């Protein structure tokens, strides 16, 4: 129902493409070095050429994919560049392989995410500010939830945590095979004080059903699973469904689902948000200090999107 088949197909075709790309990359570099190069920008122009003017992107349906397309369209330095789309998992594999071989790579990156703890990465500066400075993750609920399920509404409205909590949960998840139900359960057990601030003075629900939708990135799976456990402990019968960002907004706007803690704002999901604005209620940030952008391993010699070279 939610594009899984499409995604799998995407991974296969993109992986085979990238094998072809990897095979061609070296010849191109040799050609480039032999051709009339003015020498000044040699390092960076070779990097752009070596990368075949390609960003290693993530899922076609990710908000970040759209934002990166806007970046490619707005920067002269990225004229003719493309994104290779597949999945976050495939991107992380390619990132790990590139770093293992000290090869150049530019990835669609976001934080909080464990890749920044695992690897030495830097965001490329974005002087036009298209990715935005800072993102926050917000909680949206369907219209009518406040009247129909006021207990859930109150708990969801209070739901908020510190970046630090999220970052340590994401590191924990690595040790626990990304079993976010387990990571969330452990977090709830160990953070009863924080949980108490969300549920304080709110009477138990007594079996009311509640539909949560979440996107499938680590941050969101963690927060959705924590919300699910806390709401279940408070007497709700919670269903959690993983969906693409477009479906997440649609499900809340149409009332098919009650709530989501997944929207990244203002840049990442801004287009979806605007499309459905007025058809859902925004309860405000559940996490602040997130970020999206293009990132490279620190051994690469470029610092800004403007250090790239257009494809001629
Ligand atoms: N992300 C992580 C998602 C949202 C969370 C930035 C990769 C996206 O839709 O782009």
Image (tube, rainbow, N blue to C red):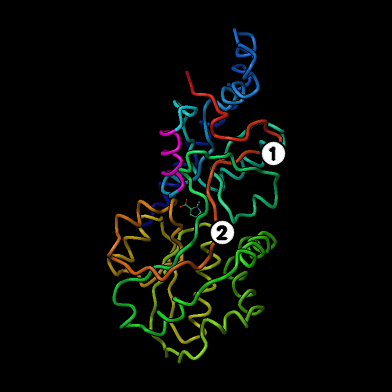
Q: What number is the disc on residue 289?
A: 2
Above-or-below relation of 244 to 211: above
Q: Quadrant of residue 226?
A: bottom right
Which residue is found at the position 44% from the left and 57% from the top?
265
Which residue is found at the position 44% from the left and 83% from the top?
236
Spatial distance from mark 2 to mark 1, Cα to Cα? 22 Å
Is 302 in front, or is 87? Answer: 302
The x, y position of residue 243, in whole percent, is: 41, 59
The residue that label 1 is drawn on is 298
- Give the foreground label among 2 and 1: 2
Task: Name the secondary structure under disc 1.
Answer: loop
Is 101 in front, or is 66? Answer: 66
Sequence order check, earlier mark of 2 and 1 = 2
Above-or-below relation of 21 to 187: above
Q: Are marks 2 and 1 in contact (CB under 8 Å)?
A: no
Residue 16 lies in the magenta stretch: no
Disc 2 crowd rating (10 Å Cα; few below 14, some 14-19, many 20+) is few
In the displayed structure, does residue 75 sit left or right of residue 123?
left
Q: Quadrant of residue 206?
A: bottom left
Task: Provide the major secondary structure of the magenta segment.
Answer: helix
Spot the residue most to the front: 127
* Range covered by the magenta-colored residues: 64-74
In the displayed structure, does residue 96 sit left or right of residue 145?
right
Above-or-below relation of 176 to 9: below
């Amino acid at each position: 129902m939610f594009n899984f088949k499409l995604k799998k197909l995407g991974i296969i075709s993109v992986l085979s493409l990238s094998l072809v790309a990897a095979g061609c990359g070296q010849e191109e570099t040799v050609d480039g070095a032999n051709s009339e190069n003015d020498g000044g920008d040699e390092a960076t122009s070779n990097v752009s050429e070596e990368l075949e003017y390609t960003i290693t992107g993530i899922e076609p349906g990710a908000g970040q994919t759209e934002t990166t397309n806007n970046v490619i369209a707005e920067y002269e330095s990225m004229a003719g560049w493309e994104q290779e789309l597949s999945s976050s998992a495939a991107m992380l594999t390619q990132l790990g392989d590139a770093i293992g071989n000290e090869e150049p790579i530019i990835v669609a990156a976001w934080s909080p995410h464990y890749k920044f703890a695992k690897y030495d990465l830097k965001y490329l500066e974005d002087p036009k500010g298209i990715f935005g400075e800072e993102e926050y993750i917000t909680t949206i609920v369907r219209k009518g939830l406040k009247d129909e399920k006021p207990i859930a509404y109150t708990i969801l409205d209070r739901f908020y945590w510190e970046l630090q909590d999220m970052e340590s949960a994401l590191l924990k998840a690595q040790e626990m095979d990304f079993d976010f139900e387990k990571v969330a359960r452990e977090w709830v057990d160990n953070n009863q004080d924080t949980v108490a601030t969300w549920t304080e003075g709110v009477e138990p629900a007594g079996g009311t059903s509640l539909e949560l939708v979440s996107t499938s990135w680590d941050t969101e799976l963690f927060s959705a699973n924590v919300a699910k456990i806390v709401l279940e402990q408070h007497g709700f019968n919670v269903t959690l469904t993983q969906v693409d960002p477009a479906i997440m907004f649609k499900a809340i706007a149409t009332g098919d689902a009650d709530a989501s803690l997944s929207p990244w704002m203002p840049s990442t999901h801004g287009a979806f948000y605007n499309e459905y604005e007025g058809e859902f209620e925004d309860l405000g940030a559940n996490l602040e200090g997130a970020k999206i952008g293009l990132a490279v391993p620190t051994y690469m010699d470029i610092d800004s999107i403007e250090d790239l070279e257009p494809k001629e």
